[in-house]
Image: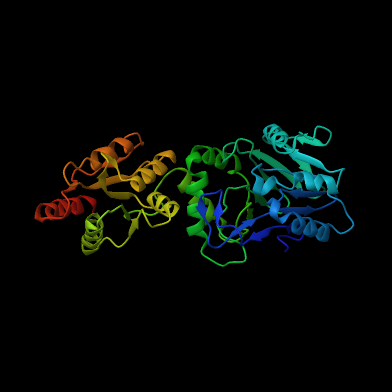
């Protein structure tokens, strides 16, 4: 596939994978992207997962024909992108590897060598001339590993972004970009919003016509839309205002009834953007992404072994690990004899920056009663 007249796509689609990084469900598979820039000199940008070694090397040979690559640019050392570095060096022994010093240190861990006889260490702002194409390397540490860099091609105005702007899903499956990109961002990159913001400052003056990530499709239309979304996500601003996420766990169904009643009452008050997640059954990564999507969150759970119900505990930990902030939070708690879930949830979330808590809490003793309905009505008024 041609990205531009000189930039070729060398990616593969993985439909055998069920869990990305051993934890993220990917029912639509995964794409591992690699690129080649054909100029007076040839640069290949990143490799692909080890399972696709032969397929990828075959594509490289097909695209290059009788020519040999001069450079392999290594933007990111996670194995789904770096696994075939040694294979490419074996096929083309004269190739020069271009990467950060930290990346070469990682190569020693993976391959037993730092390729000292064929390496070019680059730092922030360094350039590489291929002929018509002049590449600029921009350090992007902790987006989302410490060795990461991104690459800008001034000729075609293409930004190669490593894992940034990636998404779950194979590229031969058509689906909405934003949903799986949001889930990918907050699952994998979300903790490092500060570093994404630093990268934005570095690329602010670049004219970008295409974004080439290491996962997901090449972005070539309405680039401002994608940049704006990433800016919001990485600054922890709500993507959409006036939406409410209700996340619950329920043992015998009473807390579920309360969560659904809350959703109904909010809709009756005119709140149209409501998403309800059963944390024991939903995709937890989707619930996390949705919590960052809107500006209000209601948590409903039971006291369990004098602690929080495990799925709620996991959910809150996932939020706090990713710097959850700038949101309003309400609570529904349930307990047969000593409900303390609201207290425990609040204690865990108080460490978050710029969160506010609803004054009204729904406190259920086993099953909803008239007093709980009044508490819920007060919570609804506060939220809307």
Residue in front for this viewpoint, 135 or 368: 368
Q: Is 320 above or below relative to 181?
A: above
> Which scheme is used to colour this image of the protein?
rainbow
Any part of residue 268 in sight: yes
Give the quadrant of residue 169: bottom right
| Residue 314 location (% of width, % of height) | 39, 44
| Residue drawn at (80%, 59%) of the image | 58
Q: In the rendered view, does 267 fall on the left or right side of 142?
A: left
| Residue drawn at (42%, 52%) of the image | 284
Q: Quadrant of the C terminus?
A: bottom left
Q: Is 37 above or below relative to 221?
A: above
Q: In the rendered view, does 98 fall on the left or right side of 252?
A: right
| Numbered marks: total | 0
Any part of residue 228 in sight: no
| Residue drawn at (78%, 40%) of the image | 97
Residue in front for this viewpoint, 9 or 14: 14
| Residue 288 location (% of width, % of height) | 41, 50
| Residue 340 location (% of width, % of height) | 22, 40
Q: Quadrant of the N terminus?
A: bottom right
Residue that lies at the very extreme toward the right in this rendered image: 66
Residue that lies at the very extreme toward the front in this rendered image: 305
| Residue 228 location (% of width, % of height) | 50, 51
């Amino acid at each position: 596939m041609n990205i531009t007249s000189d930039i070729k796509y060398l990616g593969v689609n993985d439909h055998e994978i069920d869990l990305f990084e051993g934890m993220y469900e990917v029912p639509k598979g995964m794409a591992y992207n690699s690129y080649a820039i054909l100029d007076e000199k040839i640069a290949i940008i990143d490799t692909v997962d080890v399972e696709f070694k032969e397929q990828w090397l075959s594509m490289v040979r097909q695209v290059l024909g009788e020519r040999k690559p001069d450079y392999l640019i290594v933007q990111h050392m996670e194995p789904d992108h770096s696994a075939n570095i040694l294979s490419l060096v074996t096929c083309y022994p004269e190739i020069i590897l271009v990467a950060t010093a930290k990346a070469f240190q990682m190569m020693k861990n993976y391959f037993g060598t730092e390729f000292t006889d064929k390496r070019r260490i680059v730092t922030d702002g360094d350039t590489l001339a291929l002929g018509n194409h002049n590449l600029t390397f921009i350090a992007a540490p902790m987006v989302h590993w410490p060795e990461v860099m991104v690459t800008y091609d001034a000729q075609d105005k293409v930004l190669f972004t490593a894992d940034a702007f990636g998404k779950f899903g194979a590229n031969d499956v058509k689906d909405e970009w934003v949903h799986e990109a949001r889930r990918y961002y907050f699952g994998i990159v979300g903790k490092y919003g500060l570093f994404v913001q630093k990268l934005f400052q570095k690329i602010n003056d670049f004219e970008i016509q295409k974004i080439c990530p290491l996962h997901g499709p090449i972005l070539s239309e309405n680039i401002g839309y994608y940049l704006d979304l990433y800016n919001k996500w990485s600054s922890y601003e709500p993507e959409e205002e006036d939406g409410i996420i209700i996340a619950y766990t329920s043992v015998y169904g009473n807390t579920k009834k309360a969560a659904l009643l809350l959703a109904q009452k909010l809709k009756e008050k005119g709140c149209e953007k409501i998403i309800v997640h059963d944390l024991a059954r939903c995709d937890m990564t989707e619930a996390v992404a949705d919590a960052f999507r809107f500006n209000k969150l209601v948590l409903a759970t039971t006291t369990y072994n004098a602690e929080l119900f495990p799925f709620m505990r996991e959910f809150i930990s996932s939020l706090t690990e990713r710097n959850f902030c700038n949101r309003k939070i309400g609570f529904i708690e349930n307990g047969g004899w000593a409900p303390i879930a609201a207290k425990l949830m609040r204690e865990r979330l108080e460490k978050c920056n710029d969160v506010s808590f609803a004054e009204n809490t729904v406190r259920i003793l086993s099953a909803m009663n008239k007093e709980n309905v009044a508490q819920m009505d007060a919570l609804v008024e506060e939220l809307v």
